[in-house]
Structures are given as C-alpha cells and as structure tokens.
Image: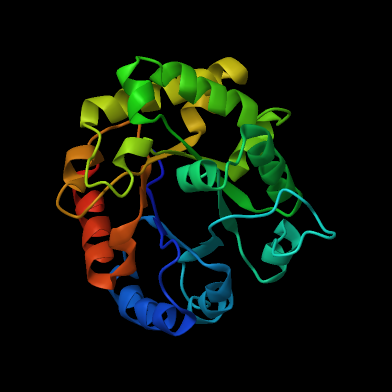
Amino acid sequence: MLNKVVIGNQKMNLTASQTRRFINAFVPLVEHANCEIGICVPYTNLATCKRALKETKIMFGAQNVSEFERGAYTGEISSAMLADIGCKMSLVGHSERRKIFSEQNSQINNKIKQNLKYNITSILCIGESKRERTAGTTKNVICKQLDECLSGLYENELEKIIIAYEPVWAIGTGQTATAKQIEEAVKIIREEISRLYTEIAGKNIVVLYGGSVKADNVKMFAGIKSLNGFLVGGVSLEAQSFSDLIHNFIGKSK
C-alpha cells in the first residue's frame, strides 16, 4: 500500500493568530486519521505551528526557501533557518513562484540541494499550462521539469523528495483534472523517475495531486492506485472542510 499523504498549502492568507485558531480547531478533527498530514504556512506562522503542533503528528513546512545558504540576500529565508525552527518540509517550484516570480528549474534545483543539506523534505511542484496540454506537450514539460529540478541528486536523496503534480490550469481556477488525466501524469512521473534512477525509485517516490481539490471531489481521485495523496490549496484554510477532505480520502482509498 502506498503511503497516504495530504498537505495543505495555505499560501499568503492566515496571520499567526488565525493559524493558531485553525490548528486548535483542526487537530481534534484529524488526530486519529490514518494518514500523513502537513500544512505549509507563511514564514511568520512557522513558530506558531511549532508550538501548536508540538504534541501532534501533523507536520508543518514553509511555502518557499532560498536557493542560497547565507549572505547578502535581503528578504530571503535559508534552509538552515527553516531547520533551526524545526521545519521539516518546504514547497519548491510552485507554479505561482514560477509564473509570478519567474523561478527557473535551475534555481529550484539549488533549493532542493539546500534543503537536502539540512534534512528538509522538498515538495517539488510540477505541471503543465493549459496551452502546453492543448499542444500535446504535457509529457515533455513534466519530464523536463523533473530532469532539471532533480539534476545532480542521488537515488537515496529521493527519500527527501515529494512530487506534487499540479497542472497550472487547475490551480485556483475551480477546474480539476480528470482521474484519467491525473493517472496518466502520475504514470509519466514514475516512468521518468525510473529512467533517471531505477524502477524501485519510480515505484517508491511519493506523488501527490493538486488543483482545486475539495472534499466532494477527492473521492473521484482517491481510487488512483499510483497516487499517494493530495496537495490542497483553498480548502486547507478551513478546519472542517480540510478534515472532511482527509476523511473522504482515507475512506475511499484502498
């Protein structure tokens, strides 16, 4: 059985006090859930998460990290800083970072390597735009992102990598990929990891789907056997909705 994983990306929304209230409401709803759960929050909320989640199994992480280890990079936050506060994971390469802040695969690769130095799991976001899917280049886009973002990594380091397939056209749009589209994309990911490393690596890599996932549609995707779980956006801002999604996933998946 594949590990079941659900991670919330709360983006630039909740303040520290709002995050504390969210956690207080959320934890009792999922404390017995047979699933790995995490939330990625703004930097200013990490300390709150560390305190509020101390006695729980829920992980917390950052939404980004610097590609540099230290130095004159005003406004940047390093992997060392995240590790020091107890942060165990970080998003890298989210489509909003790629599109709005023009992040390149080479930068994302550097971020992953920085995270590895400090034992932080990188949640690598990849996915095609609507134009790329329409043009039939989805496989090329996914493989290029994987090849360049994972360049120079050894197979054993994949234990600290989670792949999040997030088609750009389905993020925050209300549109969702079909189960068939997701299954095809996950197959591409696992085959490419197998090509870059080994079949065992392709089988064991943790793969999530993200893109307008909600409690009422997660059941459609939970039966995809090659999928480990989900990276959730807007729904992760509200404790009851997020917990409903998690329980619907656990109840449906096999």
49 or 100: nearer the viewer: 100
In the rendering, at what x and y percent does residue 249 appear? Answer: 24, 50
> Coloring scheme of the render?
rainbow
3 or 84: nearer the viewer: 84
Q: Which residue lies furthest to the right in this view?
A: 71
In the rendering, at what x and y percent does residue 28 appear? Answer: 31, 77
Q: Is residue 165 above or below residue 43?
A: above
46 or 248: nearer the viewer: 46
Q: Is residue 210 left or right of residue 124?
A: left
In the rendering, at what x and y percent does residue 63 appear? Answer: 53, 57
214 or 70: nearer the viewer: 70
The image quarter in which residue 146 lies: top right
Q: In this view, does 14 lie to the left or right of 50?
A: left
Q: In this view, does 37 lie to the left or right of 196?
A: left
What residue is drawn where x is 84% and y is 60%? 72
What residue is drawn where x is 46% and y is 73%? 56
The image quarter in which residue 169 lies: top left
Q: Is residue 193 above or below residue 61?
A: above
What residue is drawn where x is 22% and y is 36%? 223
Q: In this view, does 190 lie to the left or right of 158?
A: left
The answer to whether residue 34 is visible is no
In the rendering, at what x and y percent does residue 96 appear? Answer: 47, 47
The image quarter in which residue 106 lies: top right
The answer to whether residue 140 is visible is yes
What residue is drawn where x is 63% and y is 27%? 148
Rendered-image quadrant of the C terminus: top left
Rendered-image quadrant of the N terminus: top left
Q: Count of labels shown?
A: 0
